[in-house]
Every structure is written in C-alpha cells, then in structure tokens.
C-alpha cells in the first residue's frame, strides 16, 4: 500500500469551472431546479475523471478568457491527474504553470510530489531543493529519508519537524508501516480516526492493512466491513478483503470478492490506477496463471510483483532466473519474505553450483528470520530454523522444528512430489 503525502489544490474565491445540467440531460429546467456541478465539488467527491472532463469542456468552449481563470483550471487539472496516478501529465502541467504562467516555487514542490510517487527520487530531490520549506516539503523529505536514503539520522530530523496535524501524523504512520512497525502505525491511525470518526472513516482501511500484515485476517475483515457498507465499490477495500480471504481460505473465494471489479475491467477502456493492483493479485489468486505476461510490466510499480515473479521461477525450477531477479531488485532484503526468498534462491544455486559462499548466505538468512523476535513463533520462522539446521546437517533439530508445525501444514500432491 502506498500512503501518499497529502497535496491540496488551491481554493480560490470564485469557482470558475461550473456547469448546469438538467435531470435528463435534454430539457432545460427552471433556475431553481438546475443542478450545478463544479470542478471543486467533483474533486471533493473524488470524481477526478469527472472534474477533468468538466474543466476540459470549459476550456474548449473558451468561456473563461482571463489569465487567472486559466491558472486555476490548470492547477485543478494537475491535481486531478496526480490523484489518478498520471504523474507525467501532472508534471507537464505544473511545469507549464511554472515556466509560462508564474515563477511561484510552490510548483516545484508539486512537481517533486509527482516525481516522488513516480519513484524518480533523484529528480524529486532536485525539485525539493528549489521548493519552499513547509509541512508538505517536510513530509516528502521524511519519506525520502527512509525510502531513498535509508538514513536514520535524516529520518529523525524530519520526524522532529512534524506537527500534530492529521497530514503530518498520517505520514508518520506511513513510515512506521513501511518499516514494519505496524503497532505504532495502528496507534496513530486509531488516534486520528477518533478525532472525527465520520470524516476519517477511510483511516479504517489503513488500520485493516496493518492487521493484514500482522496475519490477523479475520480482524482486518471486521474493520473493513463498515467502510464497505458505506463505499461498496471501493477497489482498495474490496481488494484488501480479497487478500484476507485468500490467506484465510483460497484463491477462488478471493477472486469472487473482486468479481465486480473484473467485470468493469473487461468492458471499460478507462485505465484506473488501481487496475494493475487487481491484475497482479488475480495472477496470485490463480496460482501464477499468466505470470510471465502479467508480472514483468508491474515490477517497477508494484514491488510485490518482483517477489511473486521470483516465486513463479522457483516453482518452475528456473533457479537462475529467480537468482537474477533478486540480485537486480532485492540487493538488501528488508522484510521477512525478502530474506526467505533470498535464502531459498541462494540455497538452490549453492547446491547446483556446489558453492559454499551461496550456501553460507542462505544459512545466514534462514537463521536471521528464524531467530528474529517477530518471526520465531510463526510457521515461516520455524520453517526457516528447520532449513538452517538442515544446512548444518543437524537433523534431530530439523525434526523438532518440523514436528512443532506439522499440524498446521497441509499436504498436497505438489508438496509430496
């Protein structure tokens, strides 16, 4: 899950983008019955495509001729494209505003936000250095200090500058989430949600994600339910429930949870930024079906696609391809699953090449996961300890760890083979 630093569009005293429609779209109504649609009202409803359509319609008709109206409309367009994850389009508009309409350095900050979410961190830093210092820029520096620099001292510097505002606190929670400190993140989310429950209902989804990462899938589903009751078509909420049910039950049940989204994807030519997430998860739910078609285009936008492509190669005994994938994209493991995959791949390559170096790396990673406080009592953690003792040829210890999890591991024909 990507937790975005919050960027606000500017509200001006006059809304220059307003249109009037009839109930059926054909017959004019009296002034009292007319429906008024504005770009800002559509954005407040998070109907960004609708807002773009309305703004472009107004611009095409050239109903607004003065420069200020043009600037407002361009700002609104860039904001909408940002939230639709069309970062290149948003950058193009903000660059046009900065170079042709105004030299206001705030546009450099908005461009930096787009570059950050596009993963172009070096360019993001260049823009930030030309941007004004404010709460938004501090939030971007905060995330860069972890995701790009991986520097604890930098991270602390920007954490100390955070205020008690919801935007700052939610950004701090996001950092905790990315660092796998889910309880810390949950504490912040709950505190912010309690301040204004009805307005902050979306925070429940963030809490549900934390419980998903803590393997508490039933609890995660319980938390999602009120949000889905209010927003039954939410792609994020439906996808998370599907992931919970995949872990609790099977891929077929998970696929049924997002059936409505799949139906829309089949008939729609509109590209929603979250459709790729659904495509990725459907591939997982179907046990790697069409993995070589679905996953490679997603490895730059969805980090889990790299790991699942590696798993696909392992299942098909393509050990060299799996090794190359991890060597390129997971040079320094951060999460338990990354350590485990790296260990398995190194173990396979080490056995094939009779390489002591690779086998020692595998042994080190298995022990790191198996002995860690967060994983030692989990099934993967005990499997890792069993694997490390297997590499040490301590077979009595292998049996002890495997016996402790035997009742939780299902036996399939594939595992017997």
Image (cartoon, grey):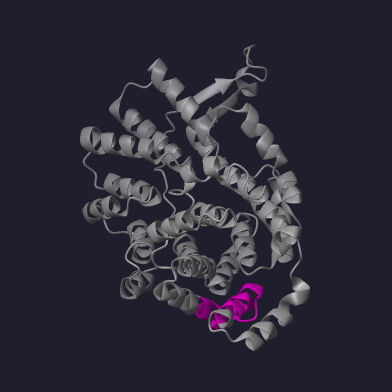
Q: Reply above or below: 160 against 299.
A: below
Query: What x and y, as percent, mark residue 401?
Result: 67, 82
Q: Quadrant of residue 132?
A: bottom left
Q: Quick one: 276 or 1, which is closer to the camera?
A: 276
Q: Is residue 41 above or below residue 61?
A: below
Q: Which of the 4 image quadrants contains residue 416? A: bottom right
Name the spot of residue 160 as percent of width and height, x first: 36, 73
Image vertical order of residue 232 relative to residue 47, above or below? below
Magenta-drawn stretch contains 372: yes
Q: On the picture, is 395 further left or further right than 299?
A: right
Q: Is residue 30 magenta?
A: no
Residue 63 screen position, x and y as percent: 40, 18
Res 323 quadrant in image: bottom left
Q: Residue at x 51, y 57 (%)?
A: 307
Left/right of residue 414 with respect to residue 331 in the rendered view: right
Can residue 44 be seen in the rendering of this structure? no
Left or right position of 63 against 122? right
Q: Position of residue 119 (x, y in %)?
A: 37, 51
In the image, 26: left or right of 249?
left
Which one is nearer the viewer's eye here, 103 or 263?
263
Which quadrant, please, contains the C terminus? bottom right
The answer, for residue 292, to whether it is visible in the render is yes
Residues drawn in magenta: 366-388
| Numbered label tally | 0
Please name whichever residue, 387 or 39, is drawn nearer the observer in this view of the structure. Answer: 387
Residue lying farthest top? 27
The residue shown at (43%, 49%) is 300
Label the magenta part by its dominant secondary structure.
helix
């Amino acid at each position: 899950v990507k937790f975005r630093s919050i960027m606000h569009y500017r509200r001006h005293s006059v809304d220059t983008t307003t249109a009037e429609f009839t109930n059926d779209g054909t017959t004019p109504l009296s002034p009292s019955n007319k429906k008024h649609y504005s770009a800002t009202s559509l954005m407040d409803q998070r109907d960004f495509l609708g807002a773009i359509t309305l703004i472009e319609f107004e611009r095409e008709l050239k109903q607004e001729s003065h420069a200020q109206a043009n600037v407002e409309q361009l700002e609104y367009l860039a904001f909408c494209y940002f939230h639709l994850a069309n970062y290149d389009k948003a950058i193009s508009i903000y660059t046009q505003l900065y170079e042709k309409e105004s030299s206001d350095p705030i546009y450099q900050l908005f461009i930096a936000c787009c570059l950050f979410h596009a993963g172009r961190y070096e360019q993001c830093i260049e823009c930030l250095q030309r941007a004004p210092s404010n709460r938004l820029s501090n939030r971007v520096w905060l995330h860069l200090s972890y995701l790009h620099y991986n520097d604890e001292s930098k991270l602390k510097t920007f954490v100390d500058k955070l205020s008690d505002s919801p935007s700052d606190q939610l950004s701090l929670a996001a950092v905790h989430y990315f660092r796998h400190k889910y309880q810390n993140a949950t504490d912040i989310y709950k505190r912010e949600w309690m301040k204004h429950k009805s307005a902050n209902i979306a925070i429940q989804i963030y809490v549900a994600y934390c419980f998903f990462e803590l393997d508490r899938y039933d609890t995660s589903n319980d938390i999602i339910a009120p949000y889905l009751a209010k927003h039954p078509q939410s792609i994020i909420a439906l996808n998370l429930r599907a992931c919970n049910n995949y872990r609790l039950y099977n891929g077929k049940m998970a696929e049924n949870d997002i059936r409505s989204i799949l139906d829309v994807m089949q008939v729609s030519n509109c590209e929603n930024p979250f459709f790729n997430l659904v495509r990725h998860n459907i591939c997982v739910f179907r046990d790697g079906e069409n993995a070589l078609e679905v996953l490679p285009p997603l490895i730059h936008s969805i980090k889990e696609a790299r790991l699942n492509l590696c798993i696909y190669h392992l299942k098909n005994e393509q050990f060299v391809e799996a090794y190359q994938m991890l060597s390129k994209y997971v040079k320094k493991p951060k999460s338990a699953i990354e350590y485990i995959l790296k260990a398995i791949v190194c173990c396979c390559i080490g056995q094939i090449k009779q390489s002591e170096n690779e086998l020692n790396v595998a042994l080190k990673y298995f022990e790191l996961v198996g002995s860690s406080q967060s994983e030692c009592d989990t099934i993967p953690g005990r499997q890792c300890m069993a694997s490390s003792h297997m590499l040490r040829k301590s077979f009595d210890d292998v049996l002890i760890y495997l016996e402790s999890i035997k009742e939780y591991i299902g036996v399939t024909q594939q595992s017997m083979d």
